[in-house]
Image (cartoon, rainbow, N blue to C red):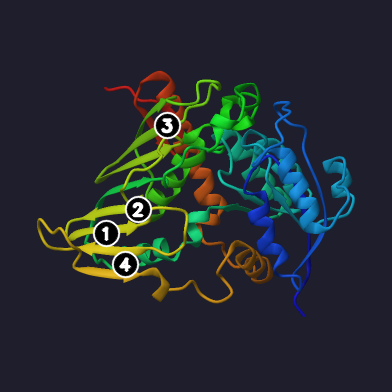
Amino acid sequence: MKRKYRVGVLGFAHLHVLEIIRGFLAMPDHYEFIGAADTAPMNETTYQGPASRWSNRERFLRMMNMDQMFESMEQLLETKPDLVLVTTENALHGTVIPQLLYQGIHVVTDKPLAICKDHALKIEKAAREGKALCITNWFSYWKPGIRLAKKLIDQGIIGKVYRFQYRNPDSLGVHPDKKQIPEEYLKREWWYQLRCGGGSMIDYCSYGIVLADWFLGRQPETVFGIKANFHHQFGDAEDYAALTLTYPEGVAFLEGTWATRSSGLPTGPIVWGDKGSLIVENYDHKNRTRVCVYQEPYASIPNIVYDSEDYPLPQGHQNLAEDVFYYLETGEDLPYLLSLDCNVKATYVLEAGIRSAASGKLFVSEYELCYDYKEE
């Protein structure tokens, strides 16, 4: 008989918390919710509107038909969970996740795994010594169009890939109705504070980092980053960021923006090879997309068009909760994008991008190395 896993929730800072929980609630034969606890806010705030910590907690209690939650992580751990969903501020991942892993408790966390390589290596060490899984969720992984694009590229439909581009769907950030929210509230929200792991580079460029790794199958040699704050001057975190990653035989261009109302262009990924190009025509956060392949010179219309609805994800692997259960039960290796291997590597690139944007210098980024680039 298959095991039923005891699941707890830690942290209500992240707006994805409820979306992640719903998938596990939909599998009551496989998961038993045993409770939740919040962590102490890195920034004290009185804002109680949509996407706030207070709102996330209240909605969770109503959804679970609960009156209260545990007062601390320690109380939550006394109930002996098998798995904990971590949705704290990004900067706390490197502190709370190792505590769970060392106790043999499996962890699912929303992206990114960590905001720097030191945090990521602490998590990796704890997972190894605690013999527990640490799974990082990327919502892009559950989009059939992106999976199909990866499959087509692996089959060689556009030949040898040398150029990759990705940017997030149009976004005005975490609180799109900012004009209706006084700045004295917003400036205290963790999303807009660098020390809390806020900003569009960590939020959205991180998607591009893991997708570039997955599609290109290799790590970049150098990283150059830029940041700007066009519309959110009340905080010190950027609302626009871009990364250029270089490879021995390739390049990737990544954008993360909280400052784009409407672009009229697909987010991608857009991938160029020596036999053509491929565009995932994703304009929003919906799952249905077209995957278009261009193989003729100067083509203005695609030679081949695929509809992602014709290529659904496999049964039993259609969302995060299903995949987590499968890999906990079987012990098989995790899909690459969800694995520690991918996500630890990604923090090296992310940190190099952050340091580059701060210094204006080009940085070298390798799995075991992250240092200032200096010409011989």
Mark on residue 278?
1
For image coordinates 70% across by 26% down, the residue present is 43
For mark 2, give the secondary structure: loop
Q: Is residue 185 left or right of residue 156?
A: right
Badge 4 vs badge 1, beta-carbon distance below 8 Å? yes
Q: What residue type is labelled 3?
A: Tyr
Mark 2 or mark 1: whose residue is earlier in sequence: 2
Q: Residue furthest front?
A: 180
Residue 152, numbered label: 4
- Residue 293 visible within the image: yes
Secondary structure of the residue carrying tag 4 is helix
Q: In which image quadrant can residue 366 be found?
A: top left
Q: Can residue 197 be seen in this view?
A: no
In the picture, residue 29 is in which quadrant? bottom right
Q: Which residue appears at 47% of the width and 59% of the height?
A: 286
Measure the alpha-carbon separation of dots 4 and 1: 9 Å
Q: Which of marks 3 and 2 is in front?
A: 3
**Proximity of marks 4 and 2: CB atoms separated by less than 8 Å:** no
2 and 1 marks in contact (CB < 8 Å): yes
Q: What residue type is labelled 4?
A: Leu
Which residue position is annotated with label 3? 240
Marks 4 and 2 sit apart, C-alpha to C-alpha, by 13 Å
